[in-house]
Amino acid sequence: MSAQVTLGFGAFFAVLAVIRLSDLLSGSSDSNLWSWLVVAVTVITAALAFWSGYESWKKEKQEKRQAP
């Protein structure tokens, strides 16, 4: 169950990053260093959540396979 929650957080942050990045690239918002820093931190957070969720999913799958 925790793997799905973590992957959900990763998807949420990925969507936030895409929305913010599209705002920056379209020119509809200020494009300063802080805006790009927010996008970078959001992308890193999404990547870490996906990685953590994948590792949890792999561990749960392995534990399920070993259970009698």
Image: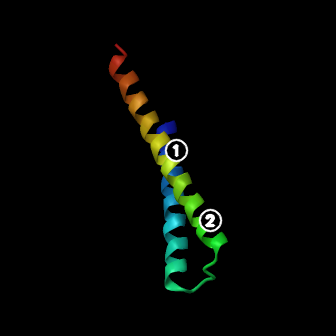
Q: Amino acid at mark 1?
A: Thr
Q: In front here: 22 or 36?
A: 36
Specify which label sits upstream in the sequence, 1 or 2. 1
State if disc 2 and disc 1 touch (CB < 8 Å): no
**Residue drawn at the location 66% of the way across and 70% of the way down:** 34
Judging by the rendered image, the residue that carries numbered circle 1 is: 6
**Residue drawn at the location 64% of the way across and 72% of the way down:** 33
User: Residue 44: x percent and y percent?
Assistant: 53, 54
Judging by the rendered image, the residue that carries numbered circle 2 is: 38
Place residue 37 in its image quadrant: bottom right
Vertical placement of residue 57 versus 64, above or below: below
Answer left or right for 67 relative to 28. left
Place residue 60 in its image quadrant: top left
Vertical placement of residue 47 versus 53, above or below: below
Place residue 27 in its image quadrant: bottom right
User: Residue 38: x percent and y percent?
Assistant: 62, 65
